[in-house]
Image (cartoon, rainbow, N blue to C red):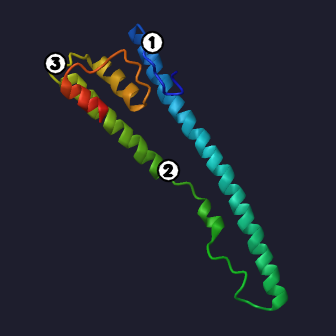
Amino acid sequence: QILTTVGYGDITPAFPRGQVWVGINVIIGLMLYGSIVMEVVGIVSARIAKSIETITEERIKAAASAQDSDVGQPLKDWPSMKKVDYKPMAESAGFFVLMATIGIMFFYLKAGENKTLFQATYMSVITLSTVGFGAFTPITEAGKVFGAI
């Protein structure tokens, strides 16, 4: 239930240390899913790059035999495109932390919700990761609307 982000609510951690363990596993699971997706993207882009290289080599050979100097020049310098850009990942992680912080502050500070800081943190992480066990739920109407958004 944790890694598939289903969370039916029939099985929930009963003790705080179990909730911490589940929260950590949810975050690690999401990172593993992201890693798998990036591996697949890497394999696909490597195959595309190989295909482009093969096509470029064929065009160069054709240009050499036709004595045409314009054909065979690559439109883009693909070897220089292999730089890894960590900015999108950092932005996504920053956005997740920002949203979790907003959720924590709301559920901890909102009158009527009566959540401890730990419960608010657990609820925010579980909700943002789309697991949603149901161990802690919003009590007020404002909390229900906030949790749905």
The reply, left or right, for residue 63 in relation to residue 42 is: right
Q: Nearer the viewer, residue 113 or 57?
A: 113
Determine whether the residue tagged by mark 2 lies in a helix, strand or loop: loop
Find residue 24 and report its horizontal and vertical position in percent: 47, 23
Q: In this view, which residue lies farthest toward the bottom?
A: 67
- Which residue bears the numbered disc 1? 10
Occupied quadrant, residue 134: top left
Q: In this view, which residue lies farthest toward the left?
A: 111
Mark 3 Cα shell of 10 Å, populated few (<14), some (14-19), many (≥20) = some
Q: In this view, which residue lies farthest toward the top?
A: 14
**Numbered disc in front, either 2 or 3:** 3
Real-space Cα separation, disc 2 to disc 3, in angstroms? 41 Å
- Which residue bears the numbered disc 3? 112
Up-down relation of residue 79 to residue 5 (above or below): below
- Which residue bears the numbered disc 2? 86
Up-down relation of residue 68 to residue 86 (above or below): below
Mark 1 Cα shell of 10 Å, populated few (<14), some (14-19), many (≥20) = few
The reply, left or right, for residue 124 in relation to residue 142 is: right
| Residue 53 visible in the shown view | yes
Find residue 121 and report its horizontal and vertical position in percent: 33, 24
Real-space Cα separation, disc 3 to disc 1, in angstroms? 25 Å
User: Residue at (24%, 17%) from the top-left corner?
Assistant: 115
Find residue 69 and report its horizontal and vertical position in percent: 73, 89
Tell me which numbered mark, 2 or 1, is placed earlier along the sequence: 1
Q: Amino acid at mark 1?
A: Asp
**Numbered disc in front, either 2 or 1:** 1
